[in-house]
Image: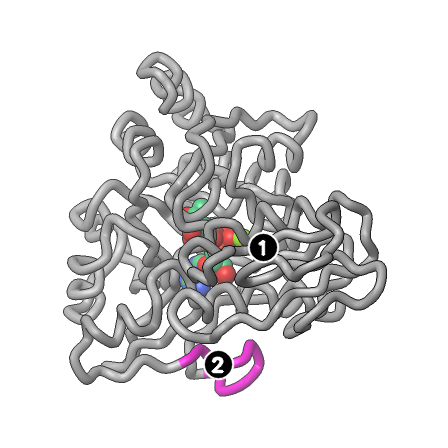
Amino acid sequence: MPDPAGLREAAARLVSGRLVAFPTETVYGLGADATDGAAVARIYETKGRPSFNPLIAHVADLDAAERLAKVDPLSRSLAEAFWPGPLTLVLERRPDCPVSDLVTAGLDTLAVRVPDHPVARALLAAAGRPIAAPSANRSGRVSPTEAAHVIAEFAGRDVAVVDGGPTRVGVESTIVQVKDGVVHLLRPGGVTREDLVDRLSGVPVIAAAEPDADPDRPVAPGMLLSHYAPSARVLLDQPAPPPGAAFLAFGPVPEGADPRLTRTLSPSGDLAEAAANLFRLLRELDATGAPVIAVAPIPATGLGEAILDRLGRAAAPR
Ligand code: TXA
Ligand code: MG
């Protein structure tokens, strides 16, 4: 945890319109004052992110969220259950919402979340305003779960990085949008579908539409098919690595595997541990220079849904 002087400096930097990367419980975010259009434009420019892909506004608590957007009863119940934590709610923006239109990419909805990390919470308190923050990686690349990953992404750019150690959850927040009494799961993430269903007693949770399916079904514009992409080609569902490939196991490392090219997401097959290790190990295996990263089969339940979503995008044709 950085000292109070360091946090004050980071908050002052945000308030002056510059970028600060900071840890959340999911991944590191590249933060800017969400009410300052020029500062938000710097996020898009620094990430190389398409400006049609809106950002998440991070706030201190549910009250702060309500000043920006209308919170319907189902969304409120989810906020009460999972905030602070890895859940993002897509809500109807209030007419007097002070957040820059660049954050929402012109949509009339706003994605909001209350992060659960002491550094993120201290920064929000010190800055006293919503912070727009996408994952702190160049657009389309693997998300950062350590300060060193962020530094490697933005070498030479005007980005201050607050180091809070490795992140706990390791995959991004779950994004949901309530529409006509149905909870649409726009992105699987740190809060599992099972957690949502438990809380919702009977309200259906349905998957998001494909980007160009039914125009009335909610989508997250940023769910591009190719994303989280290392340089190596990624092959999923491989019981063992093809010759010359790096291998990302789930469970014990196979006997006789080349230690230089092999990692395991979790020796004991624990999905929470696997999520926390996912992006770091993809980076490590990519750094070996192997042309292919083969990934072991992973169960699709619980956090496995978010892990497989990210791996599916990492494996998608580019
Ligand atoms: O865990 C997280 O959510 C991390 C940390 C830093 O908080 N942030 C994150 O941001 O993953 P980013 O920008 O990498 O992903 C935000 C996603 C994108 O897929 C975007 O399209 C979607 O949220 N999104 C933002 N505003 C939206 C809106 N109004 N409607 C639908 N989707 C929205
Ligand atoms: Mg991202």
Q: Is residue 293 above or below residue 129?
A: below
Q: Is residue 276 left or right of residue 176?
A: right
Secondary structure predominantly adopted by residues drawn in magenta: loop
* Extreme-front residue of the structure: 255
Q: Is residue 106 visible?
A: no
* Extreme-bottom residue of the structure: 214
Residue 135: give x, y in percent of width and height. 51, 47
Residue 147: in magenta span: no
Residue 270: give x, y in percent of width and height. 43, 60
* Quadrant of the image occupied by residue 120: top left
Three-letter code for the amino acid on which mark 2 is drawn = Ala
User: Badge 1 is on which residue?
Assistant: 264
Disc 2, ligand 1: is the CB inside 8 Å? Answer: no
Residue 68: give x, y in percent of width and height. 26, 51
Pick whichever of labels 1 and 2 is earlier in the sequence.
Answer: 2
* Quadrant of the image occupied by residue 216: bottom left
Q: Is residue 236 above or below residue 9?
A: below
Three-letter code for the amino acid on which mark 1 is drawn = Thr
Residue 111: give x, y in percent of width and height. 37, 57
Distance from disc 1 to disc 2, alpha carbons, whole Å, reads 33 Å
Residue at image point 53% right, 24% down: 160
Q: Is residue 71 visible?
A: yes
User: Badge 2 is on which residue?
Assistant: 209
Q: Is residue 118 above or below residue 231?
A: above
Q: Is residue 45 above or below residue 206?
A: above
Residue at image point 58% right, 72% down: 297
The stretch of residues the image draws in magenta is: 207-215
Q: Is residue 43 left or right of residue 121?
A: right
Residue at image point 17% right, 63% down: 76
User: Would you call the spot at circle 1 few (<14 residues within 10 Å), some (14-19), or many (20 or more)?
Assistant: many
Residue at image point 67% right, 44% down: 284
Q: Is residue 64 left or right of residue 188?
A: left
